[in-house]
């Protein structure tokens, strides 16, 4: 029996009302399936609809029309509270601007993510946070506040937080947008390792270098899929 895709979008639409009242069609009729364990780059310029698409996959936004199933769940069938619980356990999201809580230490940011979902027993949360920070090269920053870290360090901390509940799917929205080339390269390497370990990774980006790492590149323009290219495994 064939496995269900990790993400399956069918005739997906998202329309916003602009301040003047006219509609903005951010996503236009996208149908897309992403397999478990795949590494997909959603490539496009600013305004192409890639961030909106990632938000729909994460359940952070609701489609105007069409359906989206992620990790075996039809997101339209979940209420707000159930959706939040599902997201915490099933999806890790990495944002361009990190979104770490400034009054918590780096380790506490990870532990809070676990607490909100109840994925691990309280006694296991700090050891797991420290283990994840070790993986992303931030073990020595665990007790610091996010503002004391560099942009690259904050982004690696955000990746560790996204992994806190061991979700099968990682979604990243312009994760290298605020990073220098050297720091971005280290993040690329981290993403490759996560995919090798079995995570499904979808990255929205305009960074052609980051997209070159992906096994599949879906190019958007004006809210529509213009190209969808799978690359042969190395």
Image (cartoon, rainbow, N blue to C red):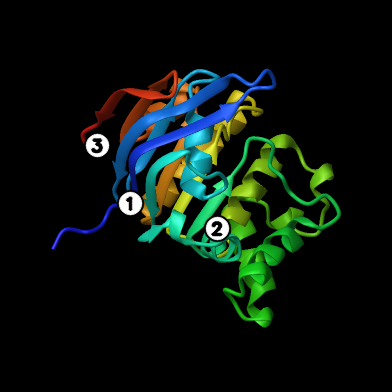
Q: Is residue 190 visible?
A: no
User: Quadrant of residue 66 in the image?
Assistant: top left
**Which secondary structure lies at badge 3?**
loop
Q: Which residue is drawn at 49% across and 39% down?
A: 54
Q: Which residue is drawn at 54% across and 20% down?
A: 47
The alpha-carbon separation of the residues under discs 2 and 3 comes to: 26 Å
The mark found on residue 210 in the picture is none
Residue bearing mark 2: 163
Q: Is residue 113 left or right of residue 208?
A: right
Residue bearing mark 3: 234
218 shown above or below 46: below
The quadrant in which the N terminus is found is: bottom left
- Counting residues from the start of the chain, the first of labels 1 and 2 encountered is 1
Q: Which dot, 1 or 3, sits closer to the camera? A: 1
The alpha-carbon separation of the residues under discs 1 and 3 comes to: 15 Å
Label 3 near label 2: C-beta < 8 Å?
no
Residue 3 at x, y percent in the picture: 22, 59
Task: Decide: few, some or many residues near mark 3? Use Cα within 10 Å; few <14, some 14-19, many ≥20.
Answer: few
The mark found on residue 37 in the picture is 1
- Counting residues from the start of the chain, the first of labels 2 and 3 encountered is 2
**Which secondary structure lies at badge 2?**
loop
Residue 67 at x, y percent in the picture: 37, 46
Label 3 near label 1: C-beta < 8 Å?
no
Q: Residue at x 57, y 73 (%)?
A: 119
């Amino acid at each position: 029996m064939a496995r269900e895709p990790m993400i399956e979008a069918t005739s997906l639409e998202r329309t916003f009302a602009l301040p003047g009242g006219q509609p903005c069609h951010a996503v236009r009729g996208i149908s897309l399936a992403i397999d478990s364990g795949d590494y997909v780059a959603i490539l496009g310029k600013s305004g192409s609809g890639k961030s909106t698409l990632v938000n729909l996959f994460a359940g952070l936004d609701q489609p105007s029309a069409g359906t989206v199933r992620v990790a075996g769940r039809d997101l339209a069938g979940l209420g707000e509270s159930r959706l939040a619980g599902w997201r915490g356990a099933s999806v890790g999201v990495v944002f361009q601007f990190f979104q770490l809580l400034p009054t918590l230490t780096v380790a506490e940011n990870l532990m809070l993510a676990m607490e909100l979902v109840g994925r691990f027993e309280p006694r296991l949360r700090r050891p797991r946070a420290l283990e994840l920070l070790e993986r992303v090269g931030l073990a020595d920053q665990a007790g610091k506040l996010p503002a004391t870290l560099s942009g690259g360090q904050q982004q690696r901390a955000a990746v560790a937080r996204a992994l806190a509940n061991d979700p099968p799917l990682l979604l990243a929205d312009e994760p290298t947008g605020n990073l220098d080339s050297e720091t971005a390269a280290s993040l690329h390497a981290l993403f490759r390792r996560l995919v090798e370990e079995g995570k499904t990774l979808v990255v929205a980006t305009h960074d052609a270098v980051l997209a070159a790492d992906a096994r599949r590149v879906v190019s958007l323009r004006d809210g529509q899929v213009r190209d969808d290219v799978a690359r042969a495994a190395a």
